[in-house]
Image (cartoon, rainbow, N blue to C red):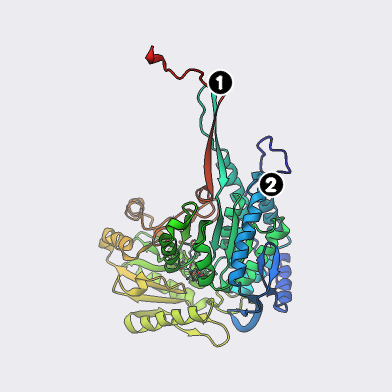
Amino acid sequence: MSTFSPNGVRQLPPIVNEPIRSYAPGSPERASLQARIKAMEGERPDIAVVVHGEERRSGKAVNAVSPHKHQHVTATWHHATAQDVHDAIESGKKAYKEWSEWTWEERAAVFLKAADLLAGPWRDTINAATMLGQSKNVFQSEIDAACEMTDFFRFNVQFARELYSEQPISGPGMWNQSEYRALEGFVYAVTPFNFTAIGGNLAGAPALMGNTVLWKPAASAMLSAWYTLQLLHEAGLPKGVINFLPGDPVMISDIALKHRDLAGVHFTGSTGVFNSMWNTIGTNMSSYRSYPRIVGETGGKDFMIAHASADVQAFAVGVVRGAFEYQGQKCSACSRIYVPKSIWPEVKARITAMIDEIKVGDTNDFSNFMGAVIDQRAFDRISGYLADAKQNAKVIAGGTADGSTGWFVKPTLVETTDPKYRLMCEEIFGPIVTAYVYDDAKWEETLKLVDETSPYALTGAVFAQDRSALKQAHAALRHAAGNFYINDKCTGAVVGQQPFGGARASGTNDKAGSKLNLLRWVSARTVKETFVPPRDYKYPHMG
Ligand SMILES: NC(=O)c1ccc[n+]([C@@H]2O[C@H](COP(=O)([O-])OP(=O)(O)OC[C@H]3O[C@@H](n4cnc5c(N)ncnc54)[C@H](O)[C@@H]3O)[C@@H](O)[C@H]2O)c1
Ligand SMILES: N[C@@H](CCC=O)C(=O)O
C-alpha cells in the first residue's frame, strides 16, 4: 500500500533533456569513460535470468562479443528455460498487487532516481557497455544510452503526470473522475539490439504506469540490457516488476503470447517479427482475459529528397550523417536519396569526399566515425547487398567489407537508374545509401515516387530553399513518414522534442517518448459519484 500521503498533486523537479557531453580530447569525461572501458574489457559478467529478483543460471550459456573485435568476449549469458518464463509470469502477478497500487509519485520517484543515477554515477558503465557490446562510437552511445534513456525516464514521468491530471467535467450535484488503472495482466517487452535506450523504455514505460513486465532483451545488446536492469534495481524498482528473460525468442514468445494474462506487447524490431507476433495473438484471441494492447515500432526505408534549390553542402552532410552514423543501423537511417540532375555531380563529389575521409574501426579509438555492424548475420546480409549493387547498379564510393577482426563495412554510395531497384525499396540496416537521379522538371512525379516506393513510412527529409517546394513536399509526403524533417537529416529524434514512430509497415506509431505511448499502458475507469441521489423514479414530464 501507499507509503506517501495521497493528498495533493506534486510538482516535479524540472524536466529537461540531458545535456550531451563532448568527450573532447583532454576533457575529464573522456578520461573517466576510457578508464571504465578499459576496466570493463577485463570483466566478463555472467548474465543471469532474473525472476522476482532471483538470479538464475540455466547453464545453457552463450558468449556475447564485441562486433569490432569478435574474438573478444564481453560477457556470457544464460538462456531462460520454459519454467523461468512461467515463473516470471507468476512473479509479475505477485508484484502487481503492490506496484499497481503505489501512488504514481512513488513509481515516478524510482524512474527519476534511475535517471539521475544514469546521468551521474552509472553513465560511464552504460556507455562502455554500449560501445563494447553494440559497437557504438562515443557520440552515438552518449546520445542513446546516456541521454535518450535518461530523457525517457524523466519525460515519461512528466507525461504520466499530464495524463493522470486529465479529468472529465462534472455536472451539478455530482463528481466524475477518471482513474488510469494499470492493465490487468503483464506486458511483454521485446527489445532490439540497436538502441540501449529503447530497451530501457520498452520495459520502463509500462512499468511506470503500474504494470509488471516480462523483458526479453536482444541477444546482441545483452551487456547494456543487463546493466540497465541493475540500474533500475539500484533505483528501487521492486522485485518482479520487471523480470528479465534472455533466451530463445520463439520459445519465450510462444509462452508469453499465448498466456491468458497477456495484457500488452511493447515491441521494437523488424516488421516480420512483429507481424508474426500479431498473428499469434490473433489466432489466440478468444483465450485472453482482455484485448492485449499491441504496440510495435518496426522497420524503415528512410528517404532524403533534395530539390534543385537545396543547399548542396547541407544535404550532403545530412546524407552522410543520416546514412552512416551507427553504421546505418538506425531504423531512421537514410537509405535512399533522390537528387535532381542539376546538382547531382556536386552532391556526389561531396558525399564521396566525406566517405573517403571517414574512419571505420574499434570504438575505443575516439577518432573513428563508424564501428562494426552488429554480427555475422548482419555482415553477410549487407555484403549480399553490396554484391548485388556491383552487379546491378553503380557503386560510387565504398563498397567493401572485411569481417576478419570485426564486422566492418565501408560507408557506401550506390547510384541506380531504376527507382524500384531493390536497394531503393528494402530495409538493409547497414551503411549503404542508394541514389536515384531525377529530372529537375519532374519534382512532383518524384515526390509521388518517394511516397509509393516502399511499404515503410518511418522517417524522411526534404531539402529545399524554395518555400513552395517545401510546401509541396510537406503535403505530398504526409503519410510517407511519421517523423518528417525539413532541411535536416532523417535521424536523431530527441525525447520530448520529436516524438518518434511511423505508420504503414513501420509500426503502430504510438510515438515512443510521448503521452500517446503511455496511454496504451493504462485502462481508464470512470467513476461518477452523485451527492444527493433522486428519491422518486418519475420524471417531471410525467406530470
Ligand atoms: N521503428 C522504430 O522505432 C525502431 C527502432 C529500432 C529498431 N527498429 C527496427 O528493428 C530492426 C533491427 O533490430 P533487431 O535486429 O534487433 O530486430 P529483430 O526483429 O531481429 O529483433 C527484435 C527483438 O525480437 C526478438 N525476436 C526475434 N525473432 C523473434 C520471434 N520469432 N518472435 C519473437 N521475438 C523475436 C529478438 O530476439 C529481439 O529481442 C530493424 O528492422 C529496425 O528498423 C525500429
Ligand atoms: N530515435 C532514433 C532511431 C531509433 C531507431 O533505431 C532516431 O531518431 O534516430
Residue placed most toward the observer, 476 or 128: 128
Q: Are marks 2 and 1 in contact (CB under 8 Å)?
A: no
Using the image, determine if residue 174 lies above or below residue 9.
above
Between discs 2 and 1, the one toward the N terminus: 2
The x, y position of residue 40, in whole percent, is 71, 75
Using the image, determine if residue 187 lies above or below residue 350.
above
Determine which of the numbered discs, if any, sits on residue 532 in the image.
Answer: 1
Determine which of the numbered discs, if any, sits on residue 191 in the image.
Answer: none
Q: CA distance from mark 2 to mark 1?
A: 35 Å
The residue at 43%/17% (across/down) is 538
Residue placed most toward the observer, 139 or 522: 522
Using the image, determine if residue 351 lies above or below residue 188.
below
Using the image, determine if residue 289 lies above or below residue 11.
below
Q: Which residue is mark 2?
A: 106
Left or right of 220? Residue 446 is left
Figure quadrant of the C terminus: top left
The x, y position of residue 259, in whole percent, is 52, 61
Identify which amino acid the numbered label 1 is placed on: Val
The quadrant in which residue 384 appears is bottom left
The residue at 30%/70% (across/down) is 419
Residue 200 makes an appearance in the image: no
Left or right of 235? Residue 486 is left
